[in-house]
Protein backbone atom coordinates (compact mmCIF):
# COMPACT_ATOMS: atom_id res chain seq x y z
CA UNK A 1 0.00 0.00 0.00
CA UNK A 2 3.02 2.31 0.49
CA UNK A 3 4.53 1.50 -2.91
CA UNK A 4 2.96 4.55 -4.67
CA UNK A 5 4.05 7.19 -2.12
CA UNK A 6 7.52 5.62 -1.87
CA UNK A 7 7.94 5.70 -5.62
CA UNK A 8 6.81 9.34 -5.80
CA UNK A 9 9.26 10.26 -2.96
CA UNK A 10 12.08 8.48 -4.77
CA UNK A 11 11.32 10.30 -8.02
CA UNK A 12 11.21 13.66 -6.16
CA UNK A 13 14.60 13.05 -4.47
CA UNK A 14 16.14 11.98 -7.79
CA UNK A 15 14.82 15.10 -9.55
CA UNK A 16 16.14 17.36 -6.77
CA UNK A 17 19.53 15.69 -6.97
CA UNK A 18 19.66 16.14 -10.75
CA UNK A 19 18.70 19.82 -10.44
CA UNK A 20 21.39 20.41 -7.79
CA UNK A 21 23.97 18.74 -10.02
CA UNK A 22 23.01 20.94 -12.95
CA UNK A 23 23.16 24.11 -10.85
CA UNK A 24 26.46 23.10 -9.32
CA UNK A 25 27.97 22.50 -12.74
CA UNK A 26 26.66 25.76 -14.17
CA UNK A 27 27.94 28.07 -11.39
CA UNK A 28 31.68 27.71 -12.10
CA UNK A 29 31.04 28.25 -15.79
CA UNK A 30 29.05 31.42 -15.08
CA UNK A 31 31.74 32.67 -12.69
CA UNK A 32 34.41 31.91 -15.25
CA UNK A 33 32.55 33.98 -17.83
CA UNK A 34 32.58 37.09 -15.61
CA UNK A 35 35.39 39.57 -16.48
CA UNK A 36 37.93 40.36 -13.73
CA UNK A 37 37.17 43.40 -11.59
CA UNK A 38 38.76 46.60 -12.85
CA UNK A 39 40.55 48.42 -10.02
CA UNK A 40 40.97 52.05 -11.08
CA UNK A 41 41.96 53.61 -7.76
CA UNK A 42 45.25 53.36 -5.88
CA UNK A 43 46.04 54.77 -2.43
CA UNK A 44 49.42 54.28 -0.83
CA UNK A 45 52.33 55.47 1.28
CA UNK A 46 55.91 55.94 0.19
CA UNK A 47 59.36 56.78 1.42
CA UNK A 48 61.20 59.51 -0.40
CA UNK A 49 64.55 61.22 -0.77
CA UNK A 50 64.59 64.84 -1.99
CA UNK A 51 67.90 66.27 -3.21
CA UNK A 52 67.99 70.07 -2.89
CA UNK A 53 70.64 72.81 -2.83
CA UNK A 54 72.12 73.30 0.63
CA UNK A 55 70.96 76.21 2.78
CA UNK A 56 73.08 79.36 2.79
CA UNK A 57 71.85 81.20 5.91
CA UNK A 58 72.74 84.86 6.32
CA UNK A 59 71.75 85.20 9.97
CA UNK A 60 74.51 82.72 10.88
CA UNK A 61 77.18 80.64 9.16
CA UNK A 62 77.43 76.90 8.58
CA UNK A 63 80.93 75.44 8.58
CA UNK A 64 81.74 74.66 4.94
CA UNK A 65 83.19 71.30 6.00
CA UNK A 66 79.69 70.13 6.91
CA UNK A 67 77.90 71.45 3.83
CA UNK A 68 78.10 70.30 0.23
CA UNK A 69 76.48 71.85 -2.85
CA UNK A 70 73.41 69.64 -2.36
CA UNK A 71 71.77 67.87 0.58
CA UNK A 72 69.07 65.21 0.81
CA UNK A 73 65.88 65.46 2.85
CA UNK A 74 64.33 62.14 3.83
CA UNK A 75 60.62 61.73 4.46
CA UNK A 76 57.32 60.07 3.65
CA UNK A 77 54.40 60.72 1.33
CA UNK A 78 50.75 59.87 0.74
CA UNK A 79 49.75 59.27 -2.88
CA UNK A 80 46.41 58.69 -4.60
CA UNK A 81 45.87 57.80 -8.27
CA UNK A 82 42.80 57.38 -10.43
CA UNK A 83 43.07 55.63 -13.79
CA UNK A 84 40.66 57.68 -15.87
CA UNK A 85 41.20 55.64 -19.05
CA UNK A 86 43.48 52.62 -19.61
CA UNK A 87 46.51 54.79 -20.48
CA UNK A 88 45.94 57.95 -18.40
CA UNK A 89 45.80 58.44 -14.63
CA UNK A 90 45.40 61.50 -12.41
CA UNK A 91 47.42 61.85 -9.21
CA UNK A 92 47.34 63.77 -5.93
CA UNK A 93 50.31 63.51 -3.58
CA UNK A 94 51.48 65.10 -0.32
CA UNK A 95 55.07 64.62 0.83
CA UNK A 96 57.08 65.79 3.81
CA UNK A 97 60.87 65.74 4.30
CA UNK A 98 63.29 66.87 7.00
CA UNK A 99 66.99 67.57 7.48
CA UNK A 100 69.16 68.77 10.37
CA UNK A 101 72.37 70.80 9.95
CA UNK A 102 74.87 70.55 12.82
CA UNK A 103 77.75 73.01 12.94
CA UNK A 104 79.90 73.96 15.97
CA UNK A 105 77.10 73.46 18.45
CA UNK A 106 74.46 75.13 16.29
CA UNK A 107 71.49 73.18 14.93
CA UNK A 108 69.49 74.37 11.93
CA UNK A 109 66.37 72.35 11.09
CA UNK A 110 64.85 72.34 7.60
CA UNK A 111 61.40 70.84 7.07
CA UNK A 112 59.53 70.85 3.79
CA UNK A 113 55.97 69.94 2.81
CA UNK A 114 55.02 69.47 -0.85
CA UNK A 115 51.53 69.07 -2.30
CA UNK A 116 51.16 68.35 -6.03
CA UNK A 117 48.64 67.29 -8.64
CA UNK A 118 49.57 65.69 -11.92
CA UNK A 119 48.82 63.24 -14.72
CA UNK A 120 50.50 59.99 -15.77
CA UNK A 121 50.68 58.64 -19.33
CA UNK A 122 51.35 54.89 -19.43
CA UNK A 123 53.74 54.01 -22.24
CA UNK A 124 54.25 50.32 -21.48
CA UNK A 125 51.65 48.01 -19.94
CA UNK A 126 51.33 44.31 -19.27
CA UNK A 127 49.54 42.13 -16.75
CA UNK A 128 51.83 43.27 -13.91
CA UNK A 129 54.22 46.07 -14.89
CA UNK A 130 53.21 49.61 -15.91
CA UNK A 131 55.70 52.29 -16.97
CA UNK A 132 54.58 55.92 -17.26
CA UNK A 133 55.82 59.45 -17.74
CA UNK A 134 54.27 62.17 -15.63
CA UNK A 135 53.94 65.90 -15.26
CA UNK A 136 52.20 68.29 -12.89
CA UNK A 137 52.37 71.28 -10.59
CA UNK A 138 51.83 72.23 -6.97
CA UNK A 139 53.26 74.11 -4.03
CA UNK A 140 55.60 73.75 -1.08
CA UNK A 141 56.38 75.27 2.29
CA UNK A 142 59.82 75.60 3.88
CA UNK A 143 60.09 75.76 7.68
CA UNK A 144 63.58 76.62 8.94
CA UNK A 145 64.39 76.73 12.66
CA UNK A 146 67.57 78.05 14.27
CA UNK A 147 68.87 76.77 17.61
CA UNK A 148 72.17 78.59 18.10
CA UNK A 149 74.33 77.92 21.15
CA UNK A 150 75.15 81.59 21.85
CA UNK A 151 72.11 83.43 20.45
CA UNK A 152 68.31 83.37 20.84
CA UNK A 153 66.16 81.06 18.77
CA UNK A 154 64.21 81.95 15.66
CA UNK A 155 62.39 80.48 12.70
CA UNK A 156 61.50 81.29 9.10
CA UNK A 157 58.65 80.10 6.90
CA UNK A 158 58.26 80.66 3.17
CA UNK A 159 56.20 79.17 0.35
CA UNK A 160 56.75 78.49 -3.31
CA UNK A 161 55.39 76.88 -6.47
CA UNK A 162 56.58 73.74 -8.25
CA UNK A 163 56.33 72.06 -11.63
CA UNK A 164 57.61 68.55 -12.26
CA UNK A 165 58.28 65.91 -14.90
CA UNK A 166 59.35 62.34 -14.28
CA UNK A 167 58.99 58.63 -14.81
CA UNK A 168 56.94 56.17 -12.76
CA UNK A 169 56.87 52.39 -12.37
CA UNK A 170 53.98 50.36 -10.96
CA UNK A 171 54.07 46.64 -10.17
CA UNK A 172 50.40 45.70 -9.87
CA UNK A 173 49.28 42.59 -8.07
CA UNK A 174 45.64 41.72 -7.42
CA UNK A 175 45.05 44.18 -4.57
CA UNK A 176 48.52 45.52 -3.85
CA UNK A 177 50.82 47.65 -5.97
CA UNK A 178 54.48 48.60 -5.54
CA UNK A 179 55.42 52.03 -6.89
CA UNK A 180 58.63 53.87 -7.74
CA UNK A 181 59.09 57.40 -9.06
CA UNK A 182 61.96 59.61 -10.19
CA UNK A 183 61.08 63.26 -10.78
CA UNK A 184 62.75 66.57 -11.50
CA UNK A 185 61.10 69.62 -9.92
CA UNK A 186 61.47 73.25 -10.88
CA UNK A 187 60.85 75.44 -7.84
CA UNK A 188 60.07 79.15 -7.55
CA UNK A 189 60.24 80.45 -3.97
CA UNK A 190 58.77 83.79 -2.94
CA UNK A 191 61.57 84.74 -0.52
CA UNK A 192 60.30 88.33 -0.31
CA UNK A 193 57.34 87.02 1.72
CA UNK A 194 59.36 85.15 4.33
CA UNK A 195 57.68 85.07 7.73
CA UNK A 196 59.95 85.17 10.77
CA UNK A 197 59.42 84.44 14.45
CA UNK A 198 61.65 84.61 17.50
CA UNK A 199 64.08 87.00 19.11
CA UNK A 200 66.82 86.00 16.66
CA UNK A 201 65.22 88.20 14.01
CA UNK A 202 64.28 91.16 16.20
CA UNK A 203 65.70 94.39 14.80
CA UNK A 204 67.67 92.80 11.96
CA UNK A 205 67.65 94.21 8.39
CA UNK A 206 65.15 92.90 5.86
CA UNK A 207 67.90 91.18 3.87
CA UNK A 208 68.70 88.96 6.89
CA UNK A 209 65.06 88.09 7.45
CA UNK A 210 64.65 86.42 4.07
CA UNK A 211 64.78 82.63 3.87
CA UNK A 212 68.23 81.35 2.79
CA UNK A 213 67.03 79.71 -0.44
CA UNK A 214 67.31 80.89 -4.04
CA UNK A 215 64.26 82.14 -5.92
CA UNK A 216 64.79 79.58 -8.71
CA UNK A 217 65.95 76.07 -7.88
CA UNK A 218 65.86 72.51 -9.21
CA UNK A 219 65.14 69.50 -6.97
CA UNK A 220 65.47 65.79 -7.69
CA UNK A 221 62.97 63.47 -6.01
CA UNK A 222 63.06 59.69 -5.76
CA UNK A 223 60.44 57.58 -4.00
CA UNK A 224 59.33 53.98 -3.51
CA UNK A 225 56.06 52.88 -1.93
CA UNK A 226 53.30 50.37 -1.46
CA UNK A 227 49.63 50.96 -2.25
CA UNK A 228 46.22 49.32 -2.04
CA UNK A 229 44.17 49.01 -5.23
CA UNK A 230 40.38 49.28 -5.19
Image (cartoon, grey):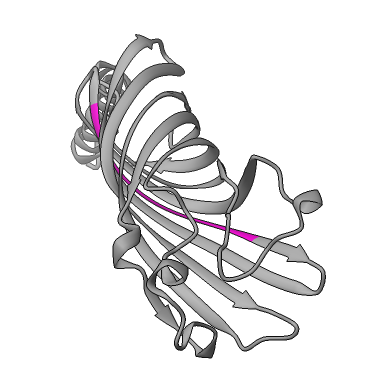
Q: Indicate the quadrant containing the N terminus: top left, top right, bottom left or bottom right.
A: top left
At x 46%, y 80%, the residue is 204
Q: Residue 131: x, y in percent?
A: 41, 16
**Residue 197 in the image, given as x and y percentages of width and height:** 44, 84
The answer to which image quadrant residue 59 occupies is bottom right
Task: Using residue 187 as the reference point, say whether residue 84 is left or right of it.
Answer: left
Q: Is residue 218 above or below residue 195?
A: above
Is residue 77 on the magenta stretch? no
Q: Which residues are magenta?
A: 89-99
* Image spot of residue 17 (x, y percent): 30, 29
On the image, the x and y values in percent for residue 175 come to: 43, 37
**In the depicted view, which residue is nearer to us: 71 or 22?**
71
Q: Is residue 176 visible?
A: yes
When the figure is inspected, residue 12 is found, relative to residue 188, above or below; the finding is: above
Q: Is residue 79 left or right of residue 199?
A: left
Q: Where, quadrant-wise, is the C terminus in this rendering?
A: top left
Amino acid sequence: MLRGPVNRLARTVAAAGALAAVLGASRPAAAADQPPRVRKFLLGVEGMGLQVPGLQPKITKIDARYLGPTVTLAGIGLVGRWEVVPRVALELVVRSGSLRYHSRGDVISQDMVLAEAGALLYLLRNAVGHLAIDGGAGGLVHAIRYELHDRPRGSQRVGGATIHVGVDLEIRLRRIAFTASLRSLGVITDVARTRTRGALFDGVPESLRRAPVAVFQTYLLGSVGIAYRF
